[in-house]
Amino acid sequence: MYNSFFIDFEDGLKRVMNNRAFYVKMLVKFKDDPNIKNLENALTANDYEKAQIAAHTLKGLSGNLSLTELFKQSREIETQIKAKSVTPDQLGILKDVYNQTLVEVEKVITENE
């Protein structure tokens, strides 16, 4: 069973009724999800509506896949977006967590192929 600071594999499996192949398939699809880029582009353009949608979607995906730290950081930036006061550090933290989560997701995929 693979668990880390970034992925709660056991919880993720429970969310898909212990269907390991389906969970891994969803992790593969997650790797191509555009919401982190959409979020960054929207914040750069000061488009808080699009940024909120991207952050909310990223939060939902990460929550459903039990990507625990990414969920936490997505929730935090979504709160800041709603207040229209995103700190520069928060986007950097989110991107770092996202990148580390991708590394961990790749490990899970490789171990379950």
Image: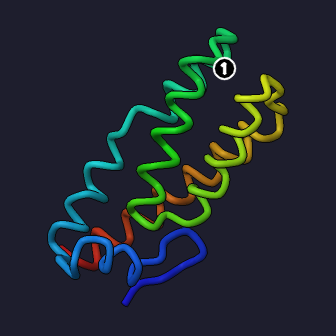
Q: Residue, x 31% and y 80% (percent of image)?
A: 14
**Relative image position of residue 71 (x, y in whole percent):** 57, 56
Query: Is 34 in front, or is 100?
Result: 34
State whether residue 68 is above or below residue 91.
below
Q: Which picture quadrant has residue 10? A: bottom left
Residue at the spot 50% in from the left edge and 30% down from the top edge: 54
Q: Position of residue 82 (x, y in %)?
A: 71, 29
Residue 78, located in which quarter of the rendered image?
top right
Q: Compared to 83, does 61 lie above or below?
A: below
Q: Residue at x 32, y 72 (%)?
A: 15
Viewer-nearest residue: 48 or 100 = 48
- What's the amino acid at mark 1? Leu
Query: Looking at the picture, does residue 19 appear above or below residue 100?
Result: below
Residue at (83, 27) in percent of width and height? 85
Q: Position of residue 59 (x, y in %)?
A: 52, 48
**In the figure, residue 113 lies in which quadrant?**
bottom left
Q: Residue furthest front?
A: 82
Determine whether the residue tagged by mark 1 lies in a helix, strand or loop: helix
Colour scheme: rainbow
